[in-house]
Amino acid sequence: MIEVKHIKKRFEDTIVIDDVSSVMKAGQCNLIIGTSGSGKTVLMKCIVGLIEPDSGEVLFGGESFTKMNRFERTEIRKQIGMLFQGSALFDSLTVEENVMFPLNMFTTWNYKQKMERVNEVLDRVNLKDTNKKFPSELSGGMKKRVGIARAIVLNPKYLFCDEPNSGLDPQTALVIDQLIKEITLEFNITTVVNTHDMNSVMEIGNYILYLYQGKKEWEGNNKEIIFSKNKLLNEFIFASEFLKDAKEMRMLEETGKIPNDRNIDDMIGPTNLPKGGA
């Protein structure tokens, strides 16, 4: 579990994170969402210690990461996996060398042990027999899966994903979402995802933190977000008429009632059925 307590961060005269608190639990996908400039990337960097907050506290498993010294933080970082926005693979290294990189950095295992673990995680992300390929030989979705394999090779307690679906087509993005969800549940990881992908919000959003101008504007899950009456949240999530209709159809499925007193024909269009029925 990760606890964020009253985090504040400013750059010169601009307040970027303004008194944000949150609890992100293990075994679920915790999403940070918001428009560009809302502070979601800065908040994630504050959580992992890439940026020091001006005030507030971050706790990993009940231990104050904020108050730790450099050596204590290193031990926590060994428990953290990172999936970067552009996958951040080393172009000159093969797939297996990319995945092995954290093992070379943080373990004293022999080569055989490292290769067994590399093959294990590559198999887990459905990339068996790709060991000797280079990143330039991989599709965008395959690169993301290599990134995920590298992120989990040390069997982390915490997984951070920065825009995991960036640059992917919708179908591949759903595959990556499902893989992240499966790994989170399978290994009981506390997963934190920074995203603007609304498919991710609805598919894997066990917990959603919505930031607006650096403040926590709303929090809940992907079921509750359908019924939220928060104007700013709804304008962000359900910006188009299509998504507004999709929200109302989902509400209709959940409650059996047509929202906002709208006529069902207005929402789904004419059916061209005879007046007497089918």
Image: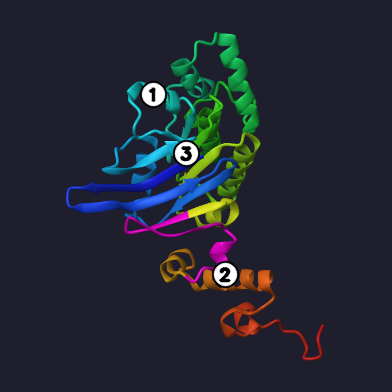
Q: Earlier in the sequence, mark 3 or mark 1?
A: 1
Q: Circle 2 — which element?
A: helix
Q: Earlier in the sequence, mark 2 or mark 3?
A: 3
> Mark 3 and mark 2 in contact (Cβ < 8 Å)?
no
- Residue in the foreground of this view, choosing between 245 and 232: 232
Q: Is residue 165 visible?
A: no
Q: Circle 3 — which element?
A: strand
- The Cα–Cα distance between marks 2 and 1, rounded to whole angstroms, is 46 Å
Identify the residue at image location x=72%, y=84%: 272
Q: What percent of the width, then of the height, locates residue 154? A: 53, 24
Q: Earlier in the sequence, mark 2 or mark 1?
A: 1
> Dot 1, how many residues are within 10 Å of its Cα: few (below 14), some (14-19), or many (20+)?
few
- Residue in the foreground of this view, choosing between 192 and 219: 219
Please name which of the two marks, 2 or 1, marks the residue nearer to the observer. 1
Read off the magenta span.
209-229
Identify the residue at image location x=46%, y=25%: 78
| Above or below: residue 254 compared with residue 187 | below
The residue that label 3 is drawn on is 160
The residue that label 2 is drawn on is 247
| Above or below: residue 131 compared with residue 59 | above
**In the image, residue 112 lies in the stretch drawn in magenta:** no
**In the image, residue 215 lies in the stretch drawn in magenta:** yes
Q: What percent of the width, then of the height, locates residue 124? A: 64, 31
Amino acid under disc 1: Glu
Residue 72 got which mark? 1
- Residue in the foreground of this view, choosing between 202 and 136: 202
Q: Is residue 267 visible?
A: yes
On the picture, is 135 further left or further right than 275? left
Identify the residue at image location x=62%, y=30%: 127
Q: Circle 1 — which element?
A: helix
Number of numbered labels in the structure image: 3
